[in-house]
Amino acid sequence: MIQYFIAKETFTHQIDCFCPGSIHATTLTINKMDIIEVTNDQSFTFNYGWYVLARMNNLGHFYIALDDLDQYFAIGRLVTDFDLELRLNYLRFQIDHALEINDEELFFNTTSQLKESSELKKKLEDYLLIADINHV
């Protein structure tokens, strides 16, 4: 099953190389709002474990270790559409709460987070709509 992620922040990822001397090892900058499409193409190496083929913004592709992908997901650098929906629901609740208790600071902080999360969700939904059209 293909899985889609969107980057919540800009970070660098070390691309592994298994050649002698690791001559192809490099770093990849994943920018905020970049979309990572994890495909079903998998590879296993005895010393390093499972790798999956990923596409970034439907432009380039690279193999990423499942451990790295899990780590980026666990610390919140990469999120799914479902994660964003949960976050939006929580932030709306927080805004309602801030209004009830007249907490201006909480209100402004939460609305800022809501705007950012809404932008991420919109970008991912637009990408998924185009991906869905292309796969039909």
Image (cartoon, rainbow, N blue to C red):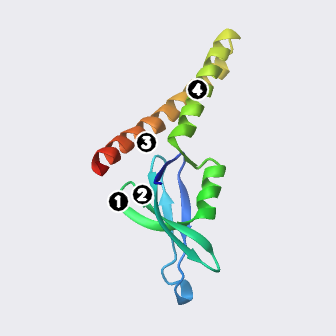
Vertical side of 44 occupied by 56: above or below: above
Q: Nearer the viewer, mark 4 or mark 1?
A: 4
Label 1 vs label 2: CA separation?
A: 6 Å
Q: Quadrant of residue 60?
A: bottom left
Q: Tag 3's secondary structure?
A: helix
Q: Give neighbour class at mark 1: few <14, some 14-19, many 20+ (Cα, 10 Å).
A: few
Nearest to N terminus: mark 3 or mark 4? 4
Label 4–label 2 contact, CB within 8 A = no
Q: Tag 4's secondary structure?
A: helix
Label 1 vs label 3: CA separation?
A: 15 Å
Q: Amino acid at mark 1?
A: Leu
Q: Amino acid at mark 2?
A: Met
38 vs 102, left or right, is left
Q: Tag 1's secondary structure?
A: loop
Nearest to N terminus: mark 1 or mark 3? 1
Label 3 vs label 4: CA separation?
A: 17 Å
At horizontal 58% and vertical 26% (from top left) the residue drawn is 89
Q: Amino acid at mark 4?
A: Asn
- For label 3, the residue is 124
- For label 2, the residue is 56
Vertical side of 117 occupied by 111: above or below: above
Expressed as whole percent of the image width and height from the top left, the position of residue 59 reads: 35, 59
Label 4 vs label 1: CA separation?
A: 32 Å
Q: Tag 2's secondary structure?
A: strand
- For label 4, the residue is 89
At horizontal 66% and vertical 21% (from top left) the residue drawn is 105
Using the image, tell me which numbered label, if any, was put on residue 59: 1
At horizontal 58% and vertical 59% (from top left) the residue drawn is 69
Nearest to N terminus: mark 4 or mark 2? 2
64 vs 94, left or right, is left
Q: Give neighbour class at mark 4: few <14, some 14-19, many 20+ (Cα, 10 Å).
A: few
